[in-house]
Image (cartoon, rainbow, N blue to C red):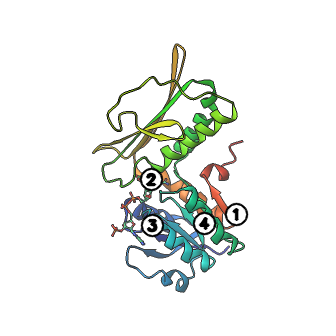
Amino acid sequence: MSKLRVAVLGAKGRIGSEAVRAVEAADDMELVAALGRGDELQTLVEAGAQVVVELTTPDAVMDNLDFCLRHGIHGVVGTTGWTEDRLAQLRGWLDAAPGAGVLIAPNFSLGAVLTMRFAQQAARFFESAEIVELHHPNKADAPSGTAARTARLIAEARAQAGCPPQPDATTTALDGARGADVDGVPVHSVRLRGLLAHQEVLLGGVGETLTIRHDSLHHSSFMPGILLGVRRVVSAPGLTVGLENFLDLD
Ligand SMILES: NC(=O)C1=CN([C@@H]2O[C@H](COP(=O)(O)OP(=O)(O)OC[C@H]3O[C@@H](n4cnc5c(N)ncnc54)[C@H](OP(=O)(O)O)[C@@H]3O)[C@@H](O)[C@H]2O)C=CC1
Ligand SMILES: O=C(O)C1=N[C@H](C(=O)O)C[C@H](O)C1
């Protein structure tokens, strides 16, 4: 069977450099390009890339995906910064590129995907839900893409179940003391040397709390998810948001 021809964008970055090694080590894949800032995207076409793994920055990701989809190249995207407007634009490009698929994975690690799923399932049973995400201090964006996604899933689950707004009697606070409000769920961001990527979902009811915690201790935690995404996206046209869609969790 022929190998999947894979390129990595952001290949010199923290996760991109690990992804380059993972693709090189995969028996069913061939690394055909490893590009960084300033490299010519045309190289992807000349190298015959079928799938691009996009691990750059929120500033770069849209132009990169536009190029890929105009050339019929599938995308597996870990880069953060997704808004409804950006998703709508991406859907438009996908409509014009029949057969092409893009996976956006807020988090490629299995534990983080399960954390999101468990939080979504538990959300309606508790009055209060808050998220604390903790990352290395070189991270550019806050809150993390994972925390934003988790908060939205919690908010959706609570809205569907008809839950009232969370209790919070705060009337005076320093800016930021109650975190960022993501669809009514407070999200608190910690940046600390020594950490990689961690998240706690705190749920509270009368007389009890439930804490769901996940820790990524090394970038290797993201690699099985990236490789799975590459294998599956070639037969998943259109937009897929969340690795859970390729994990048969239900
Ligand atoms: N979904 C997931 O599971 C994960 C997602 N991430 C996300 O991935 C992204 C990258 O994270 P991280 O590796 O830590 O960040 P880094 O800053 O270490 O890496 C980003 C890399 O992209 C390069 N780059 C910038 N612009 C371009 C461009 N136009 N074309 C090609 N390369 C470019 C940068 O080059 P230069 O240094 O010259 O600017 C840098 O080497 C972030 O959004 C992060 O949140 C990270 C881990 C897991
Ligand atoms: O920048 C990181 O490191 C990570 N970014 C992603 C995010 O913002 O959620 C995924 C993971 O948390 C690591």
Tag 2 residue: 220
Q: CA distance from mark 1 to mark 2?
A: 25 Å
x then y, percent, for residue 48: 57, 82
C-alpha gap between disc 1 and disc 3: 23 Å
The answer to whether residue 7 is seen in the rendering is: no
Residue at the disc numbered 4: 90
Are the two marked residues, 1 and 2, in contact with CB atoms closer than 8 angstroms? no
Looking at the image, residue 205 sits to the left or right of residue 142; the answer is right
Q: What is the C-alpha distance between the residues marked 3 and 4?
A: 25 Å
Q: Nearer the viewer, residue 35 or 152?
A: 152
Q: Position of residue 195 (x, y in %)?
A: 33, 44
Mark 2 vs mark 4: in front: 4
Q: Are marks 2 and 4 in contact (CB under 8 Å)?
A: no
Q: Earlier in the sequence, mark 1 or mark 4?
A: 4
- Asked where in the image residue 98 lies, by quadrant, the reply is bottom right
Write the residue at 34% across / 38% down.
175
The residue under label 4 is which amino acid type? Leu
Which residue has dot 1 on it?
Answer: 236
Name of the residue lying farthest toward the top: 207
Can you tell which mark lies on residue 20?
3
Pick whichever of labels 2 and 3 is earlier in the sequence: 3
Element under disc 3: helix
Residue 122 in the figure: left or right of residue 210: right
Q: Position of residue 120 (x, y in %)?
A: 61, 36
At mark 4, the secondary structure is helix
Of the numbered discs in the image, which one, if any, rests on residue 56?
A: none
Q: Earlier in the sequence, mark 2 or mark 4?
A: 4
How many residues crowd around disc 4 within 10 Å: few (fewer than 14), some, or many (20 or more)?
A: some
